[in-house]
Amino acid sequence: MRTMKAVVIDPDQRRVILADRPVPEPGPGEALVRVRLAGICGTDLEMVQGYMRFAGVPGHEFVGKVERCDSAPQWVGRRVVGEINAACGACEACAKGHGRHCPTRTVMGILGRDGAMATHCVLPVANLHEVPAHLGDEHAVFAEPIAAALEVAETAHVKPSHEVLMLGDGRLAQAIGQVLLLIGCDLTVAGKHRNKLDILQSRGARTVAHDEIPDRKWDIVVEATGSPDGPAQALARCRPLGTVCLKSTVAAGAGIPVVPTIVDEIRVVGSRCGPFAPALRLLASGRIEVAPLISGVWPLEKAPEAFVFAQSREVLKVLLDASM
Amino acid sequence: MRTMKAVVIDPDQRRVILADRPVPEPGPGEALVRVRLAGICGTDLEMVQGYMRFAGVPGHEFVGKVERCDSAPQWVGRRVVGEINAACGACEACAKGHGRHCPTRTVMGILGRDGAMATHCVLPVANLHEVPAHLGDEHAVFAEPIAAALEVAETAHVKPSHEVLMLGDGRLAQAIGQVLLLIGCDLTVAGKHRNKLDILQSRGARTVAHDEIPDRKWDIVVEATGSPDGPAQALARCRPLGTVCLKSTVAAGAGIPVVPTIVDEIRVVGSRCGPFAPALRLLASGRIEVAPLISGVWPLEKAPEAFVFAQSREVLKVLLDASM
């Protein structure tokens, strides 16, 4: 049996370890991918703390090369990124084209399916997107978070004339901020980290400290703090008839306040995974800048240390290199 | 009486002439602007042919410096661009914040108000936007057409995942194309001019000849041809439940077809002038590229020749320089 190096979550010790695992066997319609880079996401850090009770191989942001694909051999050798929701393809949600909301879906590195923090991973070939030839791996690995950022503009009609407040300045917020600035809206970012705010400010956002948000009402408020009181903060900042877009999944918290939602007739919209094709278009055209977002590239073997590093306050994206 | 050089439409001869006119006297709440640059728009060319029966000074794309502003003297000396709709400020539309739709509005260089193709022009100070210090005049003069382009994204929710077809490759289409590409959507541009299509293709759009549009149905179709059969073409290309966004004002034509609008449940949305603030943000951040759009800068005195040049098939934006 062929084995590989893999990062595995150890839920008892609340850490990741490096382990030898069998190279996964692709099922029908699936492809085996040799991973080049995998990104550490806030969700990964939360899962180490017990979120989703996931005890397998994490990693849902990756770029790699297809090594085997019996059902569609033309994919072998292609450099790919992949959508993380594996749908059943047969249920009512799937029939409506909403595979990302298939009730029996597995989610790569999060739910019922091992992820990409290993030398190899497996995904349905239907989930794969070929990476444009001139787009480097360090850019392509951002396809998943940029897609998630674009889901803000999928779920809410962010108009160029809108005054938008984003709560949060972390990994996901950075991606959302870049996408929102491309629309042309008047973006104010509230955060706790001057170095992270500076990145978005240099691209044209207004920035304010988390506790100094101007006392006014925004057309759209994007919640990307990862903090349990984020939704209540977002509601409090939204104008009547405005939209609150909830991006950060928080397991615990006080919930979305009912009274301002009704009294101010606010539209609250959840937003999770997004479309990969436009993410690749924006990355390939150079409209998304990833260099300032990468805090470090660590060899896969150093994943335990990389996870500790990724939890530091000042750190943004940490990439694991499985080719080293 | 102080006089100035001005371009004037001669509707009988279907041409523009250069004339001496009195420097306009700003009314209450108005500012006198010393014009630096003014752009020739498709609407200007149509007005020369009789559109709007306008016989005054054309020009609604400009950048200049405020020379006099009695009601708000702090504006004197500021470099400005200006919104072209001058609203009454008192009617029901204005009270709802829809001054661009004020029924008794005048429109700079188009309706009841002289325009900017002169050394001086007048606008309500409420219409002015200061140009950021580092933004050059050649960029700032595009604020009006970029604002008009952004109105597509104001009136239609263009999602990053949408497949969008734009009919047209001319001046306005170039501005719309750049704005749509920033959203990340999958944009196909159909046009008749290879050199104009190439500009948008180099920025990431797919392009096709006008008569070779793939036989499929787009999520959103933007009509920017300036051709009388444009609306019918747009309806025919839109998917059921999709959106047709009409941008080019065409005086004559067969109208918007009723049957496909109803049978395919298409949302038809008109789109005219747009918001200046996001246009200036996108120009100031370098996200809009104007260099490939400028076909020439002519001195104001050469306006008659510049108008003839602007009608050539291959030509995009022609700027008139009133400082020469």
Image (spheres, coloured by chain):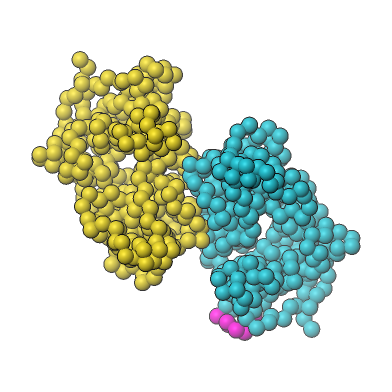
Chain colours: A cyan, B yellow
Taking the image as drawn, is residue B316 in sight?
yes
Q: Magenta segment, which residues?
A: A66-74
Left or right of A88? Residue B269 is left
State the image quarter where residue A77 is shown: bottom right
Q: Residue furthest right?
A: A12
Does the magenta run of residues contain B64?
no
Residue at (10% x, 40% y) in the render:
B13
Magenta highlight on residue A67: yes
For this rendering, which residue is in front, B29 or A142?
A: B29
Residue at screen point 76% across, 45% down: A313
Residue at screen point 59% across, 60% down? A274
- Quadrant of the snapshot with the N terminus of chain B: top left
**Image coords of residue A113 (percent x, y):** 73, 72
Placement of A316 over or under A206, stated as above or below: below
What number of labels is visible? 0
Is residue A298 something that shows in the picture?
no
- Position of the C terminus of chain B, as image quadrant, is top left
Residue nearest the observer in this picture, B220 or B297:
B220
Residue furthest to the left: B12
Relative to residue B121, is residue A291 depicted above or below? below
Residue B279 placed where, x, y %? 44, 41
Q: Looking at the picture, how far across and down is residue B189, in whole percent?
A: 36, 60
Q: Quadrant of residue B229?
A: bottom left
> As drawn, is B2 to the left or to the right of B218?
left
Where A45 sits versus B138, above or below? below
A323 displayed left or right of A161: right
Taking the spot 43% from the left edge, 33% from the top edge, the residue there is B95
Give percent across and percent down for residue B97. 44, 35
